[in-house]
């Protein structure tokens, strides 16, 4: 079995001091452990360097939460993929539903961001997922297929193999309402089948498909035990070290049981 991947998305939370404490706590807890699970934390931009400094001596990697669709130039407020690469950031979340909703990011914009990340050899963590009304009307598979096709399927096989996919049903994000393990498995299996059709069985098997949306210490074991759930993209529960570590423990338990 391939290893699991657990990513913490801090969103726009924590003061500098709190970020320092949380990173040190995670570092301390990971130190005594020989982990099979890969761990990534994605703090806000101003704390990336702090995180990469700690990551140098520890067993986790660092991701950003967004990047510009442009390479460089007069784009006030934007941060380019090359700037992230210079900071030794390895991952970057793109297409999060909060960015789709509040900043009107389209599948096309997200595709451009992914292209920028590819040029810098950074790993995109591509988020997809349906709204509550789309699930209720039974269109969830179709919506996710469209998001994946329009933002990822222009990539070459070689580039696609660098991408991590996170399925985050929008109705489960920050709501305390989690997808059932069956709902998660159904969608993850569907996503893997799409990849298989486009890029073949090996690429589909190797692709990391994470679940995100109210994943916490209590439900992680069941979610991560699903055969097509390769890890988690964790929001609220990544802001407390104990809770985040418990989710990593759940991933380790699944790996050991296999
Ligand atoms: P929550 O875990 O807080 O629901 O957030 C999930 C998420 O959006 C991670 O990107």
Image (spheres, rainbow, N blue to C red):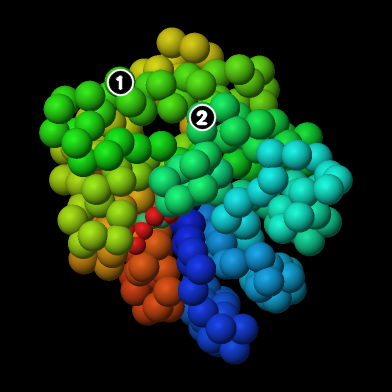
Q: Nearer the viewer, residue 159 or 253?
A: 159
N-term mark: 1 or 2: 2
| CB contact under 8 Å: marks 1 and 2 | no
Q: Is residue 42 visible?
A: yes
- Residue 30 drawn at (x, y percent): 52, 73
Mark 1, secondary structure of its residue:
helix
Mark 2, secondary structure of its residue:
helix
Disc number placed over residue 142 in the picture, else none: 1
- Residue 182 drawn at (x, y percent): 16, 38
CA neighbours of label 1 inside 10 A, class few (<14), some (14 to 19), many (20+): few
- Judge left or right: residue 132 versus residue 82: left
**Residue shown at the point (57%, 55%) measured from the top left:** 65
CA neighbours of label 2 inside 10 A, class few (<14), some (14 to 19), many (20+): some
**Residue shown at the point (78%, 35%) measured from the top left:** 119
Give the residue number, with chain letter if any, for mark 2: 107
**Residue 204 to residue 223: above or below:** above
**Residue 32 to residue 119: above or below:** below
> In terms of image quarters, where does ligand 1 lie?
bottom left
- Residue 204 drawn at (x, y percent): 46, 23
Q: Nearer the viewer, residue 46 or 253?
A: 46
- Residue 134 drawn at (x, y percent): 22, 32
């Amino acid at each position: 079995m391939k290893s699991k991947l657990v990513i913490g998305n801090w969103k726009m939370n924590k003061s500098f001091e709190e970020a320092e404490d949380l990173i040190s706590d995670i570092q301390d807890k990971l130190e005594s452990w020989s982990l099979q699970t890969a761990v990534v934390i994605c703090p806000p931009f101003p704390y990336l360097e702090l995180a990469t400094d700690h990551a140098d001596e520890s067993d986790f990697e660092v991701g950003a939460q967004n990047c510009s669709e442009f390479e460089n130039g007069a784009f006030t407020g934007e941060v380019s993929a090359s700037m992230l690469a210079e900071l030794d950031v390895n991952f970057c979340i793109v297409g999060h539903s909060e960015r789709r909703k509040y900043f009107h990011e389209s599948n096309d914009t997200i595709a451009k961001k992914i292209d920028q990340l590819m040029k810098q050899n950074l790993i995109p963590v591509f988020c997809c997922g349906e709204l509550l009304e789309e699930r209720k009307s039974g269109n969830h598979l179709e919506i996710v297929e469209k998001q994946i096709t329009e933002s990822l399927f222009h990539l070459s096989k070689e580039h696609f193999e660098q991408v991590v996919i996170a399925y985050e049903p929008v109705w489960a994000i920050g709501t305390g309402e989690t997808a059932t393990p069956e709902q998660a498995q159904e969608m993850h299996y569907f996503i893997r089948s799409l990849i298989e059709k486009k890029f073949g069985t090996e690429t589909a098997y190797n692709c990391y498909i994470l679940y995100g949306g109210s994943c916490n210490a209590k439900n992680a074991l069941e979610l991560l035990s699903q055969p097509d759930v390769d890890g988690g993209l964790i929001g609220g529960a990544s802001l407390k070290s104990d809770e985040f570590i418990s989710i990593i423990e759940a991933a380790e338990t699944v790996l050991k049981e296999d």
